[in-house]
Image (spheres, rainbow, N blue to C red):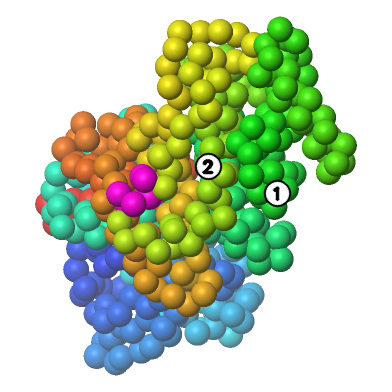
Amino acid sequence: MTEEFLQYVWANSLFTSTVCVSTKGKRVEILNVGFQNRDAGPDFFNAKVRINNVVQVGNVEIHQKGSDWFRHAHEKDSAYNNVILSVVGEADMEVYDSRGREIDAITLVYDNRLWDEYVFMQGVPVEPRCHRHLKKIDSTRLEMLFTGYAIERLERKCKDIQVMLRETKNDWEECFYRMLVRYWSGNVNADVFAQLAQNLSYKKVVRSSESLFRVEALLLGYAGLLVDVPETDEYAFGLREEYEYQAAKFQLEAMNVSQWKFMRIRPLAFPTVRLALLASLMMRFNFLLSSVLDASDVSEIYGLLDVTASSYWDTHYKLGVVSVKRVKKLGNSMKNVIIINALIPFLFIYGKERGEERYCDKALRWLEELRAERNHVSEAWTRYGVQVNSALQSQALLQVKREYCDAHRCLHCKIGAEVFRRVGRG
């Protein structure tokens, strides 16, 4: 066993009995395991035990072996003088504090199936690692845990937005714009879109919003995508001329075109198409944030994101290259990506920072209204009988994978805790 595992068994009261016998033959009754200490000092504070009918309140220290007490030099550290019980996996030595007082010790007894399950979960290459007992967890309990992890994921994303707020001196519209643009294309070009939004503020873009052509020119030109357009393509060449005028006016220096990725992505996801669609959205940016804040349900957000690229793009995916005619619109799957990853986290932190819980509640409600994302993470859980029906659930599972499964932190996962409880009960 490991010390971390023994701490987990103690913290969750997964030991076989609350009454045991110390290494000196004393009757020890565990009344309260105390509060786990994650910092320096004893492992648990304010525990409560009854030893030979005398109630004691103090700290508890846990080790694999009794001799670890001396290996860690606790006998020289006065911070351990208030330890009332030493809990070990193997009692190979009696222990004393810095005053020479002998500390009562017990060997922690637990169901061996707990350790077997822990070893399995740490070693199995298949996720979720706790899949053997997932079906034993009540669906209502799982839903509660999913809500907690969805909130945890939202709060993690909120930290990024808080950084943006500091950088923009609490300019909510600028933060909204940056979040929106970052997720405008999905994952492949997300970082490049984020760089574009950070360097080309929404105020500069909105100044050109009296004309869709001018906004297209500004976005595509700043992205570096107008450098080599052929003069034979009148529309594309006109965009370049317009951008050169705006670049001189605003003293803009275009991005390096090599940053954009076109390989191995669908033509509809090409950065040229996405930027053309973004130009259409920026034409209505002045009222977009207030409309999102005022929206009562997700269907309204779908309407706000319902944009179509200019007619040039009906026959183009790249500038200067004619293709089969197809009107370029933002599809529902891409709208979902934007709503889940940009708008909902923004709404959530907007509510938190301004002390308006209704926005936080609305963010969670929208996650519940949206269909679950279909990816390898949600599919893995579905294979083991877990119903993943909403975006709240799929976002929760992404958080579980990132923070717990990938790091083998099963003992820190609330879903893992449910599994261990059931294993301990047999």
Q: Nearer the viewer, residue 141 or 235?
A: 235
- Left or right: 134 with respect to 187? left
Residue 76 colored magenta? no
Please provide percent x and percent y for residue 316: 54, 15
Residue type (three-letter) at the residue carrying disc 1: Arg
- Left or right: 197 with respect to 381? right
Query: Which circle's residue, 1 or 2, is located before the other in the chain?
Result: 1
Disc 2: CA contacts within 10 A as few (<14), some (14-19) or many (>=20)? many
The image quarter in which residue 9 lies: bottom left
Tell me, yes or no, if residue 162 can be seen here: no
- Tell me what residue is drawn at x 78 percent, y 25 percent: 241
**In this view, the mark in front (1 or 2):** 1
Dot 2 lies on which element?
helix
Contact between marks 1 and 2 (CB within 8 A): the answer is no
| Magenta highlight range | 298-303
What residue is pinned by disc 2? 281
Q: Nearer the viewer, residue 38 or 83?
A: 38
Disc 1: CA contacts within 10 A as few (<14), some (14-19) or many (>=20)? few
- Tell me what residue is drawn at x 77 percent, y 19 percent: 227
Dot 1 lies on which element?
loop
Please provide percent x and percent y for residue 215: 65, 37
**Disc number placed over residue 207 in the picture, else none:** 1
